[in-house]
Image (spheres, coloured by chain):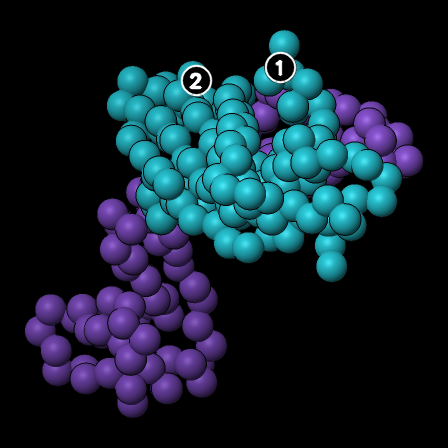
């Protein structure tokens, strides 16, 4: 099984509490002209400083990085080895004469 | 002493090439081809070659070959299993994890597809299949 991450799905909005807003105001320079500021963790943060300040923050992630298929599951869920000698297909005895598993 | 002694192994070949004509699919059905070659080096020392080839319906073409050096001690072969039998089965079983490791490393480094881990194999059945 594989999961494909769409970059759009990673742009999310998060409701901030009053304390978080105050913290953000202290953390980032309000005088920034383009209001896109790189946070200490490397993410680009957009903050709306208009009078009707919406307590929202958007995280912009490098799109190209996430535009690849990311597989999270076990390799055997993706690859199916069609070989009669794999133990997946072979029932083996325990006396060691007919089977030697590696 | 053990009846066969594993002296060393080395990688003889690693070929990896992206299969550009491969169409992405949810389940990738692979058909690896395994080959074993046992050759006597000198006296009771033998070389056992183990290789795997993947090129059918695979997102990559892969060929890995390794070679192990083994020493057979006839005095310790109490059950008279014989060098041929021990080298073509037990020695291959000893080498197989190294082959699996190389395949996993190469496919992981390709950074294109998920790491391929070769499944557990029944070496005796593998050798029978090769003889057929």
Left or right: B68, with A66 as reference point: right
Under circle 1, the secondary element is helix
Q: Residue furthest top?
A: B132
Q: Nearer the viewer, residue B29 or B103?
A: B103
Pick whichever of labels 1 and 2 is earlier in the sequence.
2
Marks 1/2 same chain = yes
* Position above or below: A69 against B25: below
Chain letter, disc 2 residue: B
In this structure image, what is the colour of chain B?
Answer: cyan
Quick one: quadrant of the N terminus of chain B? bottom right
- The residue where tag 2 is placed is B57
Q: Position of residue B46 (x, y in %)?
A: 54, 41
Chain letter, disc 1 residue: B
Q: Position of residue B9 (x, y in %)?
A: 48, 50
- The residue where tag 1 is placed is B131
In this structure image, what is the colour of chain A?
Answer: purple
Q: Position of residue A16 (x, y in %)?
A: 44, 72
Q: Position of residue A71 (x, y in %)?
A: 48, 42
Residue B47 seen in this snapshot: no
Q: Which mark is residue A5?
A: none
């Amino acid at each position: 099984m594989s999961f494909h991450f769409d970059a759009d799905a990673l742009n999310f909005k998060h409701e901030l509490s009053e304390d978080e807003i105050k913290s953000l105001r202290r953390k980032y320079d309000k005088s920034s002209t383009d209001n896109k500021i790189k946070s200490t963790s490397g993410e680009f943060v957009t903050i709306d400083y208009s009078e009707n300040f919406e307590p929202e923050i958007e995280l912009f992630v490098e799109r190209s990085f996430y535009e690849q298929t990311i597989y999270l599951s076990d390799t055997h869920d993706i690859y199916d080895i069609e070989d009669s000698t794999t133990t997946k297909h072979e029932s083996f005895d325990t006396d060691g004469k007919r089977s030697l598993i590696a | 002493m053990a009846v066969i002694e594993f002296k060393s192994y080395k990688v003889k070949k690693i070929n990896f090439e992206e299969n550009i004509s491969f169409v992405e699919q949810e389940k990738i059905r692979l058909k690896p081809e395994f080959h074993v070659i046992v050759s006597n080096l000198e006296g009771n020392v033998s070389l056992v070659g183990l290789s795997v080839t993947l090129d059918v319906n695979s997102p990559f073409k892969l060929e890995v070959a390794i070679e192990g050096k083994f020493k057979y001690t006839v005095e310790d072969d109490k059950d008279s299993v014989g060098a041929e039998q021990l080298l073509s089965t037990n020695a291959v079983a000893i080498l197989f994890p190294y082959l699996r490791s190389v395949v996993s490393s190469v496919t992981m480094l390709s950074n294109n597809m998920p790491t391929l881990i070769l499944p557990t194999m029944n070496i005796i059945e593998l050798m029978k299949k090769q003889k057929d």
